Image (tube, helix red, strand yellow):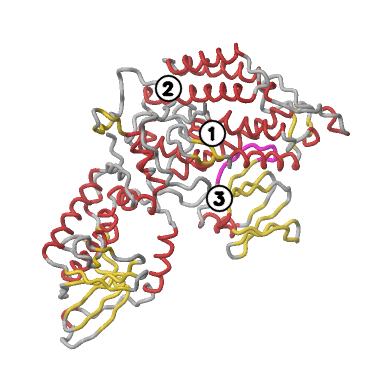
Amino acid sequence: MATVREPDAASDYLPARMLNEFVYCPRLYFYEHVEGVFVHNRETVEGALRHAKLDDGKGELTPADELAADDKLHSRSVTLASETHRLIAKLDLIEVAGGAVVPVDYKRGSPREDRKTGELIAWDPERVQLAVQGLVLRDNGYTCDEGVIYYVATKQRIRVPIDDALVAETLAAMQAARDVAAAGVIPPPLVDSPKCPRCSLVGVCLPDETTSLRLHKTNGQPVQQTLFEVDPPLSAQALDRPAEEEEIRRLVPARDDLRPLYLNTQGLRVGKSGYVLKLQEKETVVQEVRINEICQLNLMGNIQITTQAVQALCEQETPIAYFSMGGWFYGVTHGLGVKNIYLRREQFRLADVPGFCLRLARALVAGKIRNQRTMLQRNHVEPPASALAFLKEMQLDAERAEAFDVLLGIEGNAARVYFQHFAGMIKLDDPIAPRGEAADFNFDFRNRNRRPPRDPVNALLSLAYSILAKDLTIVSHTVGFDPYLGFYHQPRYGRPALALDLMEPFRPLIADSAVLSAINTRMVTDRDFVRAGESVALRPEGRKGFFRAYEQRMDTLVTHPIFGYRVNYRRVLEIQARLLARVLTGELTTYPVFTTR
């Protein structure tokens, strides 16, 4: 299994909260402590708000040798460390009375009930966290024999004796946590655990999805796959979910509450006041948008944005994407992003392994051809049998391709046949009547052309691919990849090669489908184009109509072919990128390409 981290964490102080996370879930600990990944959910936000009041304390505590036997003190927000155990803890409240100190830790939930005695007791992760606080107090000369956990939900104090048994349990957990960090291998996800639905990192961890792909059932026993399978050859065919498998829980939301914001009006100026974006046309504010209601800001053409707005968006980790007026994707501005360098290191290492690159490229191209074939089957007015048979053959050839140049040829042949029949999926009931200056335009499609596109359909396709590349560039950043280093597309200055790799199977499903929807439902009409020499481009009204069609497609719920639950395409993009990360870090051996039937 690949190692994702050098063994250097053991020398660091281990925070008490991280030991709590380790006892709760070692994988959660690895994400937060080793990889520096953190995501808020409702529970963590509520907890942060409640602790904000406790953090108002001065953090002062009378030294142990200056405490009198009759001193009664309360100290808040005190940070102490243990040199003996290399532990550090921030204590919410310390109560001093009778020469002894008692740490009080605030928790937002409620205590659990002992099944045997019916007594209310603390949860194991919280007991261990409290024991760490007791150990750092003792190491600083204080007498500490017990601690208290205050549960906010039930307003109850639960006393926890810090005895030899709890200290031994805590030190064992501490050593195990350090061993995990030093090994640098992420622990496997919990299996069917009730903890997962409430975990803020469930969308990053994908516990059920990873487990279902990671394990084979052999004689009823789960067996982990190896990294590089040699015999038989790896198949590029998409994985289908076995019927006998148990249903996989959908622990991630089907849709995001946040939406992309597209700005298409030339001369617009984007400023901000507080956490509200103000869109100005000359001196008039034409619209206000809350930053926490958008997931990305797309600027098309000559639109100005202030430094203050860029800073606010970076602070909220909301990416800003830049396009030319014609839809050419220039790049992205974003915050510091994911701090985990270890995934990128594996990406760079494996990008230099020809066998790995070819294996992944075969799967991506075969998946794309399969989805192109499905598009023709579903949408062509009279699906051509010969073309479907040819695409099936090309899919099989792609799975067996032994070299990149062979794979490129197969992909090109499949694209040629697919686009030969693309016009059969354009279904306008009434012919477009000539109207004014746009009378020269129609939606006849003969072949794929670009740079520049020379007819309306190709103009729409180029814009669709550009936006999809932008979305996958942002997803790549979110997951922790370098989007400019791919495995199939070779590095080229300014080209997001990994985003182009990931988008191959989604070109027909998202981009082509959005183009067909825009044309067939008249969201874009012949009046929405303009000609400049040989090239054809969209007018601002046409781009607006196409963005609507594209976002409708991205928001479409689709059944995941492997996991069986329904999520929208925007969520699918992130899931697939995270599955590729699992392959790079050695948790999975095969990248399951997304295909539809």
> First in sequence: mark 2 or mark 3?
2
Q: Which residues are magenta?
A: 324-332
123 or 53, which lies in front? 123
Indicate which disc residue 495 carries. Answer: 1
How far apart marks 2 and 1 lie (CA) works out to 25 Å
Q: Residues within 10 Å of mark 3 (few under 14, many from 20)?
A: some
First reached walking from the N terminus: tag 2 or tag 1: 2
Q: Which residue is mark 2?
A: 236
Q: What SS does tag 3 mark?
A: strand
Q: Which callout, 2 or 1, points to the residue nearer the camera?
A: 2
Pick whichever, 27 or 57, lies toward us.
Answer: 27
In this rendering, the label closer to the viewer, 2 or 3: 2
Quadrant including the N terminus: top left
Q: Residue at x 21, y 79 (%)?
A: 63
Q: Are marks 2 and 1 in contact (CB under 8 Å)?
A: no
Q: Amino acid at mark 2?
A: Ala
Q: Amino acid at mark 1?
A: Arg
Q: Quadrant of residue 214?
A: top left
Q: Is residue 262 above or below residue 581?
A: below
Residue 295 is marked as 3
